[in-house]
Amino acid sequence: MGGEWEELRRAIARIAGEAAGLLRDLSCDEAYTRRERGETIRADLESEEYVIDALKSEGFGGTLVTEERGLVRLGGSGPVFVLDPLDGSTNYASCIPWASVSLAAAPPGARRLSEVVAGAVAPVFYGEIISFSRGSGCRLGEAPIGGPASGSRMLYVYVEHPEAAMGLARITRSLGGLKVRSLGSAALEMAYTAIGRGYAFVDLRSKLRNVDTAAALGMTIECGGSALGPGGAPLDAGLDGVERVGSVISSHDPRVPGKILEVLGGGR
């Protein structure tokens, strides 16, 4: 079955990379950075449409859970795909080059985020695609990643409320030597953390959804790390539509999320 998931990974990585290339070509064009509704910009919709067409042209059926349209039926049977067509749209709309496309897949009939078996996070502006398939490891581009041996002390953090900011202060005081960053594409930062280019990813806003985290969660687990959701339970959510997962703590080192949760006092 690992071979089947590896073939799926290659298709997902290719499609996500092509969508990222499209977004790169459209970047800083006011026609595509204008707001359509809420936080959605035109580029979100263009990328989503591209991925839907690409999945169909590759012969995939099944369903697609996507940020803008919710649940899309691709026709026939097939995997459950999960898409964030433009993670970092605020950066993108401001012509700041840090954004990504996140695409993941679970087997036909899957109902939970934890069932994702392949995924890719494609940087829009710079860097190679990060991808994984269950049982076959993680890849940077097409190069296998053995195991994160990083000494990175980069802590990717998202907070909004004063209580969460106090929690961040406790983390930095307790763990020491951390470089705090909040760059604006949670999927990309969580993916980089999964391969060891970050100490941990911590989002305490309770805003992340299954579409934001599907690919990066799968690669975190496949790379040997762990990710915790609200209350310290393993991160998970449904796949019947766009669903909020809440706060997230993840790391390529499976011991780190528990340490951070302990520092936070067990509360989120």
Image (cartoon, rainbow, N blue to C red):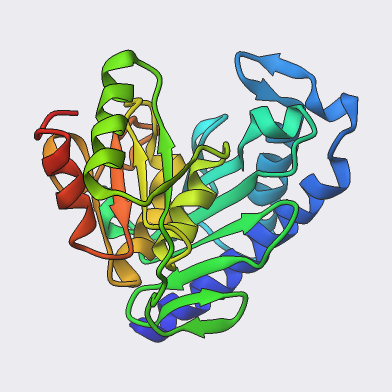
Residue at 35% x, 72% y: name it: 223
Quadrant of the rendered image containing residue 251: bottom left
Is residue 46 left or right of 231 when viewed as pictured? right
Residue at 74% x, 59% y: name it: 18
Q: Residue 69 versus residue 148: which sits nearer the camera?
A: 148
Quadrant of the rendered image containing residue 93: top right
Image position of 113 with respect to 220: above or below: above
Residue at 68% x, 32% y: name it: 91
Q: How many marks?
A: 0
Quadrant of the rendered image containing residue 138: bottom left
Q: Position of residue 66 (x, y in %)?
A: 51, 38
Q: Residue 15 versus residue 29: which sits nearer the camera?
A: 29
Q: Residue 220 versus residue 75: which sits nearer the camera?
A: 220
Is residue 69 left or right of 251 when viewed as pictured? right
Q: Inspect this view and state whether residue 152 appears.
A: yes
Residue at 49% x, 47% y: name it: 187
Image position of 233 with respect to 149: above or below: above
Q: Quadrant of the N terminus?
A: bottom left
Q: Position of residue 211 (x, y in %)?
A: 45, 41
Q: Position of residue 157 (x, y in %)?
A: 41, 38
Q: Quadrant of the C terminus?
A: top left
Q: Position of residue 120 (x, y in %)?
A: 53, 62
Q: Inspect this view and state whether residue 107 appears.
A: no
